[in-house]
Image: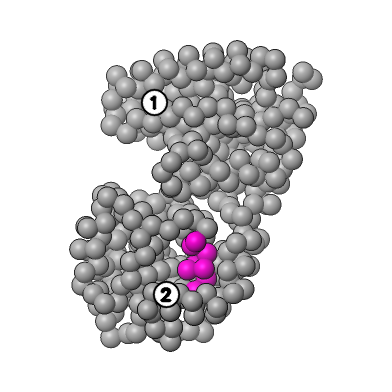
């Protein structure tokens, strides 16, 4: 069977630095495989320009075009069945996939594209133009974040181009962790010197001096007034802004346990053992850690921002509060800490919702259905 070519212009799935974007790229490849299509990484080229440099964008465009021609020559004897690009926008346009797809007359599919018209005349104008052209060529755009849908719609020539694809996970490790929750809680309590008789709050995020730091700072402000309630905050994450994060959480003193960076496979027991996941999610696209927590049965309190409402059911799998509102966030935490019965109900709903909407199998079915339809429509090779 001919293979599907995969490309992630923002960050390849082989990148050394862990992130939610790298995680989703790997999951996209796994979903294509699960759908029954062999997949290969077509290029590791990063087209990302974070500074808004027109000169750099021009260099990246030229390099991308040369790599597209090289890719065509390499694949001439064994053309791919389709081209699949993950995460495409003005800072990371796809200069390779559209050219290769046109040459071989194969379907061009995109997942998690975003389109910001205000960038048309800004410092990323060149990248914006490249991303807009690529999105306009796509046969299918899998909309991972519903927040992007309205701006994308004018680029589509047909109503069937946009296909909803909710964020997803391989659920087994999280469900297994939930099944062993009490055992994990005992083990973690002993290893981290925690009181297993009081509620545990959990945050899991990298420590960068950007919106991540802003979220940590809001978390500190939100939790500080809750000193009269029993709770401990477990923080999983590390990064260059760790001293600033520790400063932001210093008012919580002995209530905080810093775990440092943990590999993804080590996180499910902490999600399952925790009572509530707390993350303000300032500037978050949707937040993979929020989905992971729910997959292990942990209710979430988060900011109502971006695509977060699409994965956190307000009042069902957690609570959403206005973005950047520390007082509202603190009130939500107080409400759940004071109501163990409600946390139990939310825990059950978290497991049911992630199984129904956010599993690798359901994503594979969505992607596989689109690939089958598109390849049937194309002429035989």
* Residue 206 figure quarter: bottom left
**SS type, badge 2:** helix
Query: Residue 325: x, y in percent?
Result: 29, 64
Q: Position of residue 299 (x, y in %)?
A: 49, 70
Q: Nearer the viewer, mark 1 or mark 2?
A: 2
Q: Residue at x 35, y 60 (%)?
A: 260
**N-term mark: 1 or 2:** 1
| Magenta stretch: helix, strand or loop mostly | helix
Q: Bounds of the magenta span?
A: 266-273
Q: Is residue 82 left or right of residue 153?
A: right
Mark 1 — residue? 127
Numbered tag placed on residue 191 in the rendering: 2
Q: Which is nearer the eye, 349 or 43?
A: 43
Q: Is residue 87 visible?
A: no
- Disc 1 residue crowd, few under 14, some 14–19, many 20+, Cα 10 Å: many
Q: Is residue 51 above or below residue 56?
A: below
What x and y, as percent, mark residue 267? 48, 62
Would you identify the image quadrant in which residue 170 lies? bottom right
Instruction: For marks 1 and 2, give the CA distance.
Output: 48 Å
């Amino acid at each position: 069977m001919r293979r599907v070519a995969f490309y992630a212009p923002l960050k390849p799935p082989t990148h050394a630095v862990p992130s939610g974007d790298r995680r989703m790229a790997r999951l996209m490849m796994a979903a294509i495989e699960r759908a029954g299509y062999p997949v290969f990484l077509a290029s590791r080229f990063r087209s990302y320009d974070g500074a808004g440099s027109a000169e750099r964008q021009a260099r990246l465009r030229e390099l991308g075009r040369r790599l597209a021609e090289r890719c065509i020559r390499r694949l001439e004897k064994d053309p791919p069945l389709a081209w699949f690009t993950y995460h495409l926008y003005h800072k990371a346009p796809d200069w390779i996939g559209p050219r290769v797809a046109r040459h071989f007359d194969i379907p061009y599919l995109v997942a998690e594209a975003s389109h910001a018209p205000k960038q048309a005349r800004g410092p990323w104008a060149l990248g914006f133009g490249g991303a807009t052209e690529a999105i306009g060529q796509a046969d299918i755009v899998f909309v991972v974040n519903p927040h992007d849908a309205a701006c994308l719609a004018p680029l589509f020539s047909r109503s069937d181009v946009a296909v909803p694809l909710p964020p997803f996970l391989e659920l087994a490790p999280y469900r297994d962790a939930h099944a062993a929750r009490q055992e994990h809680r005992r083990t973690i309590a002993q290893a981290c010197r925690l009181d297993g008789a009081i509620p545990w709050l959990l945050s899991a995020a990298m420590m960068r001096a950007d919106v991540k730091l802003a979220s940590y700072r809001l978390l500190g402000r939100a939790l500080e007034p809750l000193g009269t309630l029993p709770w401990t905050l477990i923080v999983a994450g590390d990064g260059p802004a760790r001293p600033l994060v520790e400063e932001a959480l210093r008012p919580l003193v002995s209530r905080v346990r810093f775990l440092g960076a943990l590999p993804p496979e080590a996180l499910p027991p902490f999600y399952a053992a925790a009572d509530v996941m707390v993350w303000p999610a300032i500037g978050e696209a949707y937040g993979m850690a929020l989905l992971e927590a729910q997959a292990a049965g942990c209710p979430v309190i988060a900011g109502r921002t971006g695509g977060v409402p699409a994965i956190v059911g307000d009042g069902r799998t957690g609570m959403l509060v206005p973005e950047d509102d520390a007082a509202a966030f603190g009130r939500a935490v107080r409400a759940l800490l004071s109501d163990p019965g409600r946390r139990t109900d939310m825990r059950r709903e978290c497991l049911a919702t992630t199984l129904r909407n956010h599993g690798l199998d359901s994503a594979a079915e969505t992607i596989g259905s689109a690939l089958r339809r598109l390849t049937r429509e194309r002429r035989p090779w």
